[in-house]
Image (cartoon, rainbow, N blue to C red):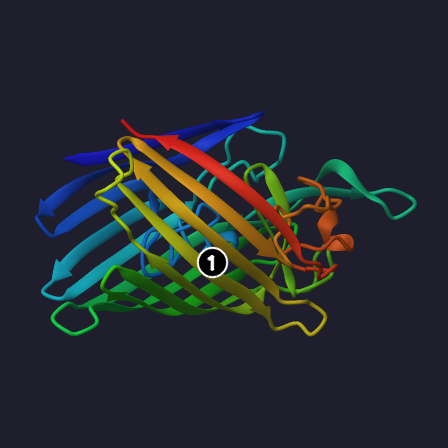
């Protein structure tokens, strides 16, 4: 029997990250039931080595736990993951209606419009709940070659249960690869995703869908391509006794949207991960023209009133198309 439980508390809100029980069938196979990470992309965090992740994470296609059952196994050089999720993880405790969660999901949000057309908080709940999602991931391990590599594909399909809107569906397909050249690691991924919804909804568009996490909601493009790449180098300096390893990296990802009036959302990350004993420290410099949280200039936006759909730029609608930056240091101690 195996299992994992992780719950997180932040300033003013808290939520479950993962919580599952499982059974290890043999050395290469196991079954997990509960809130577990869905199988999509080349690894648990997609292509990324950074603290910010890449754009797959911000549309729910990397490090996204949902409620269901997952089976993982190895057959020779093949790795296989198959999963069914009855729903996304449940909403935690916070001020938003449905966005107090770790993984980015399609969500319900709350909206009213006053006599001047301004969007404010109110009692009318609209949006979606994820239902009946299937995930399949296959990875082939090429180890006995000049450049050891992992080649894989990921597939996802699920339903969207509408609240005061029509039901919809969503799907995603991805090809991904990890190459190892000495101490260099090159991870790449190309993904197509689509949320199929009707335009007969409060925001009068089938090109935007409400998504949320970390007690905050905003619109995301319903149809897009996501190319992503991460280049990193692992250095273990024996001459520095207090440093076990350092991994510098450069990463790029982009949400290339179908809608002609939506600007693409790029994300560059230059950083390094430092390991020393139980310490694991990230130092990251991120530049983006479409991620709302990467901003030296503050932008207007709301939590549940979804105000960013009305002109504020973010990686869904991306109305301002301005480059912003953010430097971040994260100290983690593991014991």
Task: Please say if 306 is above or below 252.
Answer: above
Q: What residue is shown at x 25% (from left), y 47% (from top)?
A: 236
Give how far across and how far down residue 47 sits, in percent. 38, 59
Does 236 sit left or right of 66 as displayed? Answer: left
Q: Does residue 236 appear anywhere in the picture? A: yes
Closer to the camera in the image, 288 or 173 = 288
Q: Which residue is mark 1?
A: 56
Residue appearing at x 72%, y 46% in the figure: 297
How many discs mark residues in the rendered view? 1
Q: Which residue reaches farthest front?
A: 239
Which picture quadrant has residue 19?
top left
Q: Quadrant of the N terminus?
A: top left
Indicate the secondary structure of the residue bearing disc 1: loop
Position of residue 71 in the picture relative to residue 29 (left or right): right
> Where is residue 215 shown, x and y percent of the image?
58, 36
Q: Position of residue 281 (x, y in %)?
A: 39, 37
The residue at 66%/72% (across/down) is: 259
For residue 299, side relative to residue 108 (left or right): right
The answer to whether residue 155 is left or right of residue 4 is right
Q: Which picture quadrant has residue 204?
A: bottom right
Of all residues, the one furthest to the right in this rendering is 116
Residue ID at (18%, 36%): 2
Which quadrant is the C terminus positioned in? top left
In this orientation, does residue 103 appear?
no
Q: Compare residues 152 and 15 and report the one nearer the observer.
A: 152
Q: Position of residue 256 (x, y in %)?
A: 57, 70
């Amino acid at each position: 029997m195996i299992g994992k439980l992780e719950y997180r508390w932040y300033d003013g809100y808290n939520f479950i990250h993962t919580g599952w029980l499982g059974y290890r069938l043999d050395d290469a196979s196991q079954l997990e039931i509960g809130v577990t990470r869905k199988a999509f992309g080349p690894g648990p965090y997609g292509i990324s080595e950074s603290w910010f992740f890449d754009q797959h994470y911000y549309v729910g296609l990397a490090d996204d736990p949902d409620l269901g059952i997952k089976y993982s196994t190895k057959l020779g050089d093949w790795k296989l993951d198959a999963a069914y999720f009855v729903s996304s993880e449940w909403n935690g405790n916070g001020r938003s209606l449905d966005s107090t969660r770790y993984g980015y999901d399609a969500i319900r949000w709350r909206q009213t419009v006053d006599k001047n057309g301004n969007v404010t908080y109110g009692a009318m709940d609209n949006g979606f709940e994820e239902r009946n999602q299937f995930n399949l991931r296959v990875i082939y391990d090429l180890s006995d070659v000049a450049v050891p590599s992992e080649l894989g594909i990921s597939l996802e399909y699920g339903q969207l249960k509408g609240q005061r809107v029509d039901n919809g569906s969503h799907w995603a397909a991805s090809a991904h690869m990890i190459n190892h050249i000495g101490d260099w690691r090159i991870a790449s991924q190309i993904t197509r995703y689509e949320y199929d919804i009707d335009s007969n909804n409060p925001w009068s568009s089938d090109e935007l869908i409400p998504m949320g996490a970390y007690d905050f909601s905003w619109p995301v493009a319903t149809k897009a391509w996501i190319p992503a790449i991460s280049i990193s180098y692992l250095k273990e300096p024996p001459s520095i006794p207090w440093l076990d390893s350092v991994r510098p990296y450069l990463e790029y990802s982009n949400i290339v949207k179908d809608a002609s009036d939506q600007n693409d959302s790029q994300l560059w990350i230059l950083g390094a991960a430092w390991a020393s004993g139980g310490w694991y420290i990230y130092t990251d410099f991120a530049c983006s023209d479409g991620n709302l949280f990467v901003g030296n200039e503050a932008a207007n936006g709301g939590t549940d009133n979804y105000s960013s759909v009305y002109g504020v730029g973010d990686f869904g609608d991306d109305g301002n198309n301005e480059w912003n930056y953010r430097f971040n240091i994260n100290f983690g101690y593991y014991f």
